Amino acid sequence: MTITARSSRIEPGPSLPEPPRPGRISLFADLDGTLAPLEITPDRVGPDPARRRLLDELEVALDGRMAVVSGRTLEDLDRVLEGRVRALGAVHGLIRRTADGRVIEARGLERMGEALEAVRAFAKDDRLLLVENKGAAIALHYRRRPAAAAACLALAREVGARLDLAVQEGDMVVELRPRGPDKGAAVAAFMSEPPFAGFKPVFIGDDLTDEDGFRAAQQLGGYGVIVGPRRPTVARYALPSIAAARAWLQEALKAVR
Ligand SMILES: [Mg+2]
């Protein structure tokens, strides 16, 4: 049980999960803040031997029923994951690569060029603001300029309203993207296909956008696991840190060794 500071109401918080049984689940995992540490800029996150070993072992134990679902692009995910994970939900679910390698993209990307111009014009005089063009989404990162948070959010909302784009707030980042599939829709789509279909979906993540993934997993008979302290959440379970998330997945692998 946790007591929320704002209202003093007592609410049931998510509890620590038992390690999952790899033979029964399909695993969906966010990358940054879940399997990888949060860095000051996204390109600081690179390949990591310990993570690669963990992913390789999971891929075998799960018989391929593992997808990484992230805000990053497909190309960037392949870079960080060294091409080891076939099934990917990229750009928060707007682009999906299936377990058999098909790439499925959302429609409505034609307004993104105009949005990119507006965001670049806004950020051009401040070298600490980072504009990331993901093709299917534009991210404005202000981790190195936290004082600009309100101005960045206001700009994103103005451009979003003008061009009918969705505004997605993240951890020191705001994104513009077409209204379309989210991480939950990506989970549902994977769960309708082999090799994922017929197993219990487990979604582990830390982002606001992971809430859609938690909800979808739970609606499909599985559960969500939030990593870190962000609340509120719809996830049924929680792990306190990235280290705890890795340990939890390692523990699951022991059952199949
Ligand atoms: Mg994350």
Image (tube, rainbow, N blue to C red):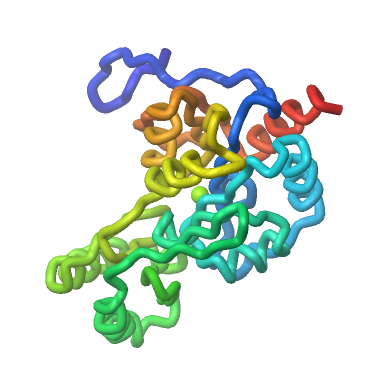
**15 above or below 186?**
above
Q: Is residue 5 left or right of residue 206?
A: left
Q: Position of residue 164 (x, y in %)?
A: 16, 67
Residue, far right: 257
Q: Is residue 94 visible?
A: yes
Q: Quadrant of residue 194?
A: top right
Q: Quadrant of the N terminus?
A: top left
- Residue sitting at x 59%, y 68%: 76
**In the image shown, does 129 or 107 lie closer to the viewer?**
107
- Residue sitting at x 64%, y 25%: 24
Q: Position of residue 240 (x, y in %)?
A: 57, 31
- Residue sitting at x 66%, y 63%: 80
Q: Position of residue 176 (x, y in %)?
A: 30, 66
Q: Is residue 153 left or right of residue 35?
A: left
Q: Is residue 148 visible?
A: no
Q: Count all numbered tags in the image, as a single digit.
A: 0
Q: Quadrant of residue 107?
A: bottom left
